[in-house]
Image (cartoon, rainbow, N blue to C red):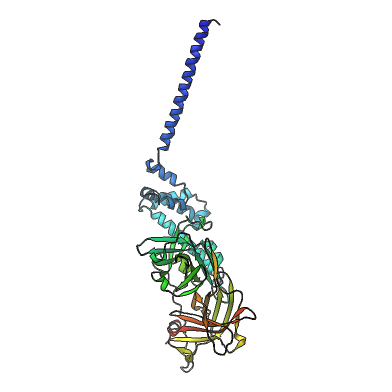
Amino acid sequence: MEESELEIFRSKFVRGSSVTKQHAWRNQHSEKRCSSSISSISLDRMPSEILVKILSYLDAVTLVCIGCVSRRFYHLADDNLIWVRKYAAAFRSKRSRWKATSVEETATSLSLLSVWDKEDGYWKKEYITKQISSVKAALTNSLSPVKRRTSLPSKTKESLRISGLGWTIILREASGKEHIMQHSNLSVNDNSVTVFWHDKNWPHVDTLSTLDLYGATPIFMEQYKGPNTSCPRWLSLIEKYDLSNLRKSAMIGCDRHVRVFCVNPGLLVGLWQENGGLAFVMANIHSHGLFERSIMGSDTIPYTLPPDTTFVDNYPDSMTFYGDKGFQLHIDIHGSKTYFLCSTFHNLFCRRAGINNGYVKFLMINLKNNREHLPLVGKVGLEWRTDCLNGRIESCIVVDMTLLDEDKKPIWYVSSPVCLRSACLPDFPQPAYSFEYMDSVGGVCADLGWFENTDEYFIVRLDIYLSVAKLQQWFGRQ
């Protein structure tokens, strides 16, 4: 190849390489411009028709969550056509399933009849209402078996698993600010449920005014897969507690880390010894009406169990007792997870001679009768736990009581922490302690003796009180 031809070849090669580089540079920058233009396209700029089409592929839980993003997405996620299809898929009648009618056909027929003439969100409300009814129906079936001894539900754990029921507290400051906390763990007892809350970021107790206890149930039970905190739930108010004067409440125990205060009914609040801040909250809820109160109420009004009365014939005024078989009392004494006593008393009668200050007294255990004394098994005390520490308060226990009439219907029931205090018993040489609980319906007073040779407590006296007003209302007579 001559020198002139070689120069021409070199010039062509150089020009070609520069052109190739130029093309590569252009392609690279065009890709950047394309990617930047794609990234600049947000969902907000997309047409509503396309967004509704995308949302139609989401499940009900995600749809409800999407509705919390913005006002536009709230209205898009309320689209009746989306929800009527989900309604048709979830609640097709048996006849339509037998005919193997497709979801699309059912939704189309429903949409032609009642989609466009309804306000936005109508079928969403219908779907959620039907879901709540399904949860309640499933719970009703699971709660029908009851324990023969106490007439309380026998499948509490199974019902909790089916419903996904949990418990939530809302702490309100005096300024109106709210702190919502789901339970950290719980313990299912024979006749009650003990629920715990503990957190590292509690608000300071001096700023709190009230604590509201709610049952929290997943709306979409078929998609419930355990304690999913993001799952939409509906709240049922169980109890309101006043925390404005918490430090003035009765302190029922302490250890080197915490002091615990009891707020009736059944709430225990632990404060750190070091700085007085909140350490934990524990609620004791009796099993009678547990699910009804945790599910059937609204977020502002608690559910009230329907009154149950029994009418009896008149008895002689000189000696009045109710029923032919007498009352029955079941009592459990336990810590947060450990049982110390589980006992049942039968054939209890109330007589006029036992009425004092508006209460009828039932003598369960007589101090002078050693054969009636009952031991508390194990190391007595209340266990507590937080994210960083745990301990046990020796002077605190939980008492569950259920008083049944002759038809085994609960007249009075309670689950509450109580305090063991030093006592002096006549003609009793051993160290003695006592605990008591009283409300407008009933109460309990007990004396315990400490026997060093066996290292255990014995209940040496136990009295139960029931208000005359409750008896009159229950039996429909004066």
Quarter containing the C terminus = bottom left
Residue at horizontal 45 percent and vertical 86 percent from the top: 359
Q: Position of residue 49 (x, y in %)?
A: 39, 43
108 sits to left or right of 426: left
Q: Nearer the viewer, residue 170 or 281?
A: 281
Quarter containing the N terminus = top right
Q: Is residue 37 above or below residue 352?
A: above
Whether residue 111 appears in this view of the structure is no
Q: Tell me which corner region of the image, top left, top right, bottom left or bottom right, holds residue 40.
A: top left
Q: Is residue 258 above or below residue 201?
A: below
Q: Position of residue 140 (x, y in %)?
A: 51, 67
Whether residue 176 appears in this view of the structure is yes
Q: Position of residue 334 (x, y in %)?
A: 56, 73
Residue at horizontal 50 percent and vertical 88 percent from the top: 350
Q: Please tell me how many numbered marks the rendered image carries.
A: 0
Q: Position of residue 409 (x, y in %)?
A: 51, 78
Residue placed furthest toward the right: 453
300 sits to left or right of 455: left
Residue at horizontal 46 percent and vertical 26 percent from the top: 27
Q: Nearer the viewer, residue 41 or 250?
A: 250
Q: Nearer the viewer, residue 278 or 27?
A: 278
Q: Nearer the viewer, residue 349 or 124?
A: 349
